[in-house]
Image (spheres, rainbow, N blue to C red):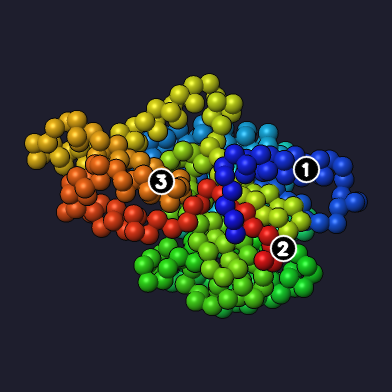
Amino acid sequence: MRHFRLGLLCALLSALFSISLRGEEAGTSERTETVFSAVITSDLHYSARRQEAGLIVPLLPHVEEAMRALAEEVIALQPDAFIATGDLTVSGKEEDAEALSGIMREIHEAGIRVILTPGNHDFDSDKDSYGRNYGFLSEGDLHDPNSLSVLTRIGGVSIFAMDDCTGGSGMNAGFSASTCEWLRENLERERASGRKILFLAHRSVLLDRAVYPESYRIANPELPSILENAGAQLIFTGHMHNQKLLEKGILHELISAMPWTGSYLIGRLSIEGDSILYQTEPIDFDRFGEEGLSEIAEEAAKKAAETWREVPMSLGREKGLSEGELREAGDLFERVISSYQDGVLPAHLEEIRENESLDLLRELIRETNYGPWFEDLLANSGTDASSLSFQWGK
Ligand SMILES: [Fe+2]
């Protein structure tokens, strides 16, 4: 895997998107290679009702308008697919699922395949609302009889949108033995037909078992090897609300951030032949959505930043420290958190480690819940998750 400079990647991705679109317009008769594009997101936590502003997600009261803006942008981009990996609504309530399904229908009717997986929140109040409201999106696709897992074929890509909420124990994520069997059989057949495999689920395949509890990851320990054996190199999941990239052997797992936090990111994937390109970019609230939404989103981002800054600052005020030095520590804390949310912490790590306020910040939060978490973020910042580029099969 190689990481490109952002500008170069932007240019390449735009070029590939336009090639992909021209290919679609020109018809498929001369197309021998895979050409596929998708907009990918997760954890929409949509509600048609006005939600309270969350401490970390101040845009929450405007999710209805923001979701409409996102749908408008997706329709304008015209990818082959729009993918959302679970926690589609905040509670799975019928009224919310029904309203979201109306927006999904608009994307679907614009000629874009909408591919969804259920998340734990989609089953909070009504287990059947998911199938009732989103079932029309996967009509004609291959369904697992024992879960809500679906196999969708688009171009040369076989997309396994897996339901990890039905087969786990309690709130934990997992597949039942019969769903595992369904997955194995279908992976084998799709692989044999030379198709590229995308694996989607709400919870993670590759998160470290020693660190993360079972509610964060799919329990089946054999899953990574099932996918590896089937040559399924690309996995998209969610649930964490932060952008993250995990890699193991040939497997690449992108955990998509919630689009209403951090820099309001969505992912754009383009597959042309064996070239895989993925990049995050902010939702364009300036161009899409109702008037004034861009300012609301900007204001919400400022409010979130202020909330994070206040964590060390309020602790320092209790100790009688000056507002000036606390401001520096607050800014640094906010930068670490927002970089983490956007999946770009590794790129800022050097600058953060050299920052003169780091020692003070560490000292201020050491005794709080943020202390060990912050140290862990710095020690295990992981891989830059804002872009990914690799050759399939290599
Ligand atoms: Fe979730």
The foreground one among 220 and 333 is 333
Look at the numbered disc 2 and give the secondary structure of its residue. strand
Pick whichever of labels 2 and 1 is earlier in the sequence.
1
Q: Residue at x 19, y 34 (%)?
A: 325
Label 1 beta carbon within 8 A of ligand 1: no
Q: Which mark is residue 19?
A: 1
In this rendering, position of residue 380 left or right of residue 99: left
Residue tagged 3 = 348
- From the top left corner, tell me how far across and down residue 267 is, in percent: 58, 46
Q: Quadrant of residue 178?
A: bottom right
Residue 36 is situated, as x and y percent measured from the top left of the image, at 73, 51
- Residue 341 position (above or below residue 391): above
Residue 20 pos. (x, y %): 76, 45
Which residue appears at 34% of the width and 35% of the height?
Answer: 305
The answer for how far apart the CA atoms under marks 3 and 1 are is 33 Å
The residue at the point 56 percent across, 32 percent down is 284
Looking at the rendered image, the disc whose residue lies closer to the viewer, 3 or 1, is: 3
Q: Is residue 265 visible?
A: yes
Q: Residue furthest right?
A: 29
- The quadrant of the picture occupied by the N terminus is bottom right
C-beta proximity under 8 Å, tags 3 and 1: no
CA distance separating discs 3 and 2: 34 Å
Q: Amino acid at mark 3?
A: His
